[in-house]
Image (tube, rainbow, N blue to C red):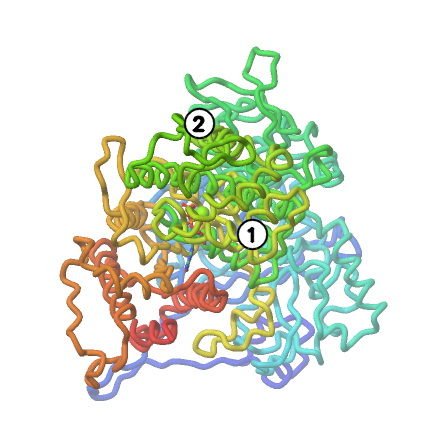
Amino acid sequence: MASLVRRFVPEKAVDFDVDDEYNVEYSFAMEYKGPAVSYTIPRVDPLNVDCIPIAARVSTRGVGENLSLPVVRPIVKADYLKHNLLKVESQGDASLVPVTNSNELDVARVLDGSKSHRTAFRVVNVIDTSGELEFSESDECLPRISKKYESSGTLGFFDSHDNSCDLSESSDMECVHEDYNENGASSTGHEVEVAKSSVKKGSCHRCLVKKRFVEKEACLVCNAKYCSSCVVRAMGSMPEGRKCITCIGRRIHESRRASLGKSSRMLRHLLTDDGVKQIMSHEVSCEVNQVPPELVIVNGKPLCREELSQLLGCPNPPRKLKPRKYWYDKQSGLWGMEGEKPCQIITPQLDVGNPIMRNASNGNTKILVNNREITKRELWVMQRAGIHCEGQPHFWCSADGSFQEEGQKNVIKRIWFKPKIKLLCSVLSLPTPLESASPGQEEVHGVANGAVPNKLAKKTSHKLLMVGYDKSGTSTIFKQAKFLYKVPFSKDERQNLKHMIQSNLYSYIGILLEQREQFELETTNEMGMRSINQPGPTDTLNSDGIINTNMYSISRRLKAFSDWLLQVMMSGNLAAVFPASTREYAPLVEELWKDRAFQATFDRINEIQMLPRVANYFLNRAVEISRTDYEPSDMDILYAEGIASSNSIASVDFSFPKSVNDSFMGASDQDDPLQRYQLVRVHSSSLGENCKWLEMFESMDLIIYCVSLTDYDEYIYDINGVPTNKMLESKKLFESIVTHPVCSQKDFLLILNKFDLLEEKIEQVPLTKCEWFHDFNPVPGSSNNSSTRNPIAPLAQRAFHYIAAKFKREFKAMTGNKLYVSRVTGLESDSVDEALKYGTEVLKWNYEKPSLNMNEWSSDSIEASTFS
Ligand SMILES: Nc1nc2c(ncn2[C@@H]2O[C@H](COP(=O)(O)OP(=O)(O)OP(=O)(O)O)[C@@H](O)[C@H]2O)c(=O)[nH]1
Ligand SMILES: [Mg+2]
């Protein structure tokens, strides 16, 4: 048997004792011929030793000094072999393709992805980079190297088997692994790789000692791993970086490209700093480690060396270029993988590849931009930017984002000048130009006012989409997140918020003034007094010569201001008029504030339904806020209604600060400052009819749906004055989102917000006011009943549990999944912190789902923690 084994070890090794020096492990199975047994006897598929091919150098003609010895892969038993699949590694990607039973296995056809699904019997592992591999015509074990290659006389194979060997018998099949360079000749290394898969998992590929938990260094080409004692001997001086000596001159495996130049701890321990630096520098810069130009295909054309250099050497090159097919829009600089949406904006006007094809990004919108049919996401962005696409026009778009309709001179829009559009792109995972690439554009930071900085957007790993019905508190929670996770409001954002607070203040004043008129009229009627326009001899006159008819009457000057303000409010132009006019009207606000009639109206603020709760907070400081030098405090920002004047979409990137150690259920993942989240808040009105624009958010990981707990007794009125309960409207929106195809497999977190207000309201207004909650019937006195889960649960808490259960049931019925719920008071930071951490926990559980018994986390235990 030793002589048989000797056949497979290198020539030199024959002099050694095979068993000792090469640690060759082998065992033999013999057919069982004994009496019948009750258990299954292990079976081994017979191996036809003669079928194992052996490589040999048949000639050294033309062989350079750097050429390593060719080696044939040993027999590998892989799962895919059982399924008669062909493992094709092409352009760095491996794929399994059913093999035809044809004796002429057309590799090129397979590589092209053509599907031939006839029963297979031959399984070969081919690494092909040039598509020039040919298979022999006969039913052989081995594919032959292309004739072109064979005829070079450099390398050949001899098959020590007869052609009739039955490959289906021996599933431990032979694998040939070969590389070619751009000329079709073998790359400098030329060797056929030793299959390292025969080495036991966790073992060093040189000493074969199993050191499972010991750090190892892997070869960038064949992934053979070496322990610290062997790495230098196995890799030598590493002139091309971390490669086995036998792999020098060969292309790295594409999956390892990202690790080029990133030295390991092990090397830093073994070598000097300078030594490691040098190796890493070689690894990054040596020619053989670069992406081969012909494998980068741009607009259907494989690149030549010059084109690749141009592409990589331009000011803004593609990131992480791999051997694959790309599309490139020369005019706009948009760049993407073939059949996919754009992923980057690179330097425009490069002379690389063919002209772009209409279907380059697989768009289906019928809208052409620079001759490419754009994707739905891009169309959405264009529409949001105000570009009309009716009639399916064709557009030209230049690198600065200027859109022109084909055949027309005028620029319709310059989209990159709009921070809102950059933000939208970031949320939709569409590229935006680098700041430096579009000079003159507004500097933007952060959220509502602008785009998420590019570098942050790139680090984001989990996306959370927050949406809710009107006034559910989404912007309050969003702002709270910014304060909590230390994402500062930029100067621009603060300025915007200041303007928003000031114009809101004027709208509150307007509402008060309107109400004042009402009170004045009522009082006049009650007292039977004369109309203010018909002064009598006994009327008292104020300094302006105006009749003080009752306590709600105001001077003519203030009346004029009041009339003007009400008119502006009616026209809906308040936000546009303010804050430009703030300076002008600040003295009037002060005068108004001191006015007896206005104060009398303000005293009755609780009777004024139209005023939001927060109005009080701002109106109390009306004089200070209306001044031009007013700077909003953090508290003002939090209480302000909204995030910015464009109330549609906002995004913030954050991570949980390290110091936080009270994370949910002791989990510590959120403490990882490198784990980033992107919280995207979208106003429901931006989702369009039937939430059709939700499809833009398919990349979101978690949907956070926000409900105001106080909505149960509040109504909205349609144009005919027909009221609809807001809680029912909120439920309707929830259903539309949950049942939207984009959300079908998404995790949901329901935030039941404004718990503080519910506590007040529920004592005054029964929950049953909303017909959906008609069966809320808390047993009187149950708060003292020790059998209940929470013996002293107040009414608001029971109402909350009830509402949560209602939504959960609804969700379960629609999706069959579990809805996670969190109780929140948006104005309290701890409460928002807990809810967002809970949301990220939900994501984590679901990633780990198979290994975790979800029953351990019953909704009660989850919510109990959240509710406390
Ligand atoms: N008391 C109290 N008020 C809250 C709470 N959450 C939000 N609010 C207030 O409710 C109002 C609406 O909250 P927003 O955060 O603006 O709600 P929204 O979802 O952005 O609503 P839209 O304006 O429709 O976008 C604001 O005045 C908030 O200050 C809360 O938990 N408690
Ligand atoms: Mg709001």
Question: For the point 38% across and 75% down, which residue is it?
Answer: 868
x, y percentage for residue 710?
31, 56
Q: Is residue 269 left or right of residue 529?
A: right
Mark 1 close to ligand 1, CB under 8 Å: no
* Mark 2 burial class by Cα count in 10 Å: few <14, some 14-19, many 20+: few
Rounded to the nearest angstrom, the CA distance separating label 2 from label 1 is 26 Å
Question: Under tag 2, what secondary structure?
Answer: helix
Judging depth in this view, the residue of 529 and 423 nearest the camera is 529
Q: Which mark is residue 571?
A: 2
Please state the total of marks drawn on the protein image: 2
Marks 2/1 in contact by CB < 8 Å: the verdict is no
Question: Under tag 1, what secondary structure?
Answer: loop
x, y percentage for residue 292?
67, 44
**Residue at mark 1:** 621
Judging depth in this view, the residue of 694 and 430 nearest the camera is 694
Question: For the point 62% across and 25% down, which residue is it?
Answer: 402
Does label 2 or label 1 sit earlier along the sequence? 2
* Residue 133 visible in the shown view: no
Q: Which mark is residue 104?
A: none
